[in-house]
């Protein structure tokens, strides 16, 4: 097939571009657009030949859009208006303005793109912005399918449940039966002339929750009421939470975390600087989601990782021979120094930016400029996406 001309909006550090390459689809990104100067530095380092427009989307005229003559649009609009722990301003949030501008421009294009892919947070699927998107797509003659997917459905041990939409012009029908429901797994190869009725059945099944319908992470559930103190096992953990974690660790369809970790030996980055400071250990020990290299799970890494503690992502217990329960169950009556001594036995550290990038599917050669700080790397990665999930969706979209 001829190389597709792709427009990448809200390009960030280039997660969509990386996924496009990983999909193997012949394509050229004719323009990437983002106003984040630090993200643009990272993008330019990794994709130096791609035209990068450091401007607001609202500042791009219809004439400029038409001049690009693109076949595909990849975009990940700002998620803050739709997050479950935010104000959920939706279309009234000023950060949604650029997305609404895109919806206004789309029907006016001289040539409609054949393909469109959008990523956002869980919560977008119930928003007014999503309703506007679907109306625009229908009016323009697109067929679309919505998803809620996590990297766990591809065997990656990281929970990052996200909303996705793929859309095609009617002249390019999907090879699978489209459902009006939000699917929780990749579509089966059921032929389009199947007897399945549109709008009545999800391809993932109505009764089963599907592999990617995961419990809310701590960052998404801060408002929930914690059970009485006596209901906790150790740490601030219920029987149900512990059972869910054990099920993940026993799920052989998921890779071990050690697959994505850096080697301690011969490491130029200096893993020692990622160990949690004593103050954080004492204050937040009972709130941490602690995993070991032999675990098959980790919680969603957010942009606050390494800066804020609760609900921003898992931390790694590098002393695998130490039993977590034995450390926490003997805290009663200990002094702060004694507690710190016990906690230090676990050798807890943050995941490095490289390790999070590995979990997100960025290849080893993907890098960050020397002037970008660790805190900025965490922030950029927390705002990015999983490359493998998007690559599979692009393949399904274009196949």
Image (cartoon, rainbow, N blue to C red):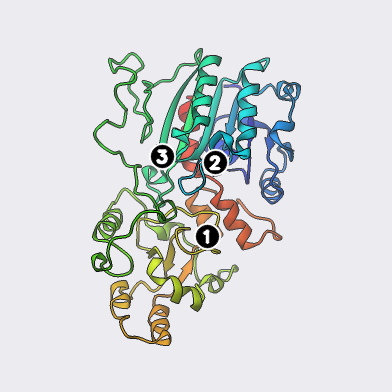
Q: Which residue is mark 1?
A: 305
Judge whether residue 336 can be spotted in this image.
yes
- For the residues carrying marks 2 and 3, which lies nearer the camera in this image? 2
How many tags in the picture? 3
Residue at x 32% of width, y 80% of height: 331
Which mark, residue 27? none
Q: Which residue is mark 2?
A: 81
Under tag 2, what secondary structure? Answer: helix
The picture quadrant where one finds residue 206 is top left
Between disc 1 and disc 2, whose residue precedes? 2
In this view, 81 is above or below 241: above
Between disc 3 and disc 1, whose residue precedes? 3
In this view, 31 is above or below 160: above
Under tag 1, what secondary structure? Answer: loop
Which mark, residue 149? 3
Specify few, some or many for label 1: CA neighbours under 10 Å numbering under 14, 14-19, or 20 or more: many
- For the residues carrying marks 3 and 1, which lies nearer the camera in this image? 1
**Which is more toward the observer, 12 or 139?**
139
In this view, 164 is above or below 263: above
């Amino acid at each position: 097939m001829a190389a597709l001309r792709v427009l990448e909006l809200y390009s960030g550090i280039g997660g969509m571009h990386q996924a496009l390459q990983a999909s193997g689809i012949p394509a050229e990104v004719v323009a990437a657009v983002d106003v984040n100067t630090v993200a643009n530095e990272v993008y330019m380092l990794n994709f130096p030949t791609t035209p990068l427009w450091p401007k607001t989307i609202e500042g791009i005229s219809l004439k400029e859009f038409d001049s690009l003559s693109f076949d595909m649009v990849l975009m990940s609009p700002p998620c803050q208006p739709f997050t479950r722990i935010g104000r959920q301003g939706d279309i009234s949030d000023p950060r949604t303005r650029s997305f609404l501008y895109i919806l206004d421009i789309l029907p006016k294009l001289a040539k409609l793109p054949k393909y469109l892919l959008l990523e956002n947070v869980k919560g977008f699927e119930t928003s007014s912005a999503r309703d506007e998107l679907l109306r625009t797509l229908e009016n323009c003659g697109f067929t679309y399918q919505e998803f809620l997917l996590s990297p766990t459905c591809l065997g990656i041990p990281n929970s990052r449940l996200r909303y996705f939409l793929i859309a095609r012009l009617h002249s390019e029908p999907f090879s699978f039966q489209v459902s009006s429901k939000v699917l929780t797994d990749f579509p089966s190869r059921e032929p389009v002339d199947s007897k399945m009725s549109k709008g009545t059945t999800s391809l993932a099944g109505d009764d089963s929750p599907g592999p990617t319908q995961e419990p809310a992470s701590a960052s998404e559930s801060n408002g929930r009421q914690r059970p009485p103190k006596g209901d906790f096992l150790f740490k601030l953990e219920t029987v149900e939470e512990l059972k869910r974690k054990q099920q993940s660790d026993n799920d052989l369809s998921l890779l071990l975390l050690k697959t994505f970790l850096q080697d301690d030996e011969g490491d130029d980055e200096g893993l020692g600087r990622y160990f949690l400071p004593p103050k954080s250990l004492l204050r937040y020990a009972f709130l941490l989601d602690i995993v070991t290299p032999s675990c098959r799970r980790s919680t969603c890494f957010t942009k606050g990782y390494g800066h804020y503690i609760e609900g921003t992502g898992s931390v790694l217990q590098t002393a695998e021979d130490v039993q977590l329960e034995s450390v926490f169950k003997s805290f009663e009556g200990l002094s702060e120094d004694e507690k710190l001594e016990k906690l230090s036995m676990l050798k807890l550290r943050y995941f490095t930016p490289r390790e999070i990038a590995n979990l997100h599917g960025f290849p080893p050669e993907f890098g960050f400029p020397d002037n970008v700080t660790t805190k900025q790397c965490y922030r950029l990665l927390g705002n990015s996406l999983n490359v493998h999930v998007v690559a599979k969706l692009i393949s399904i979209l274009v196949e």
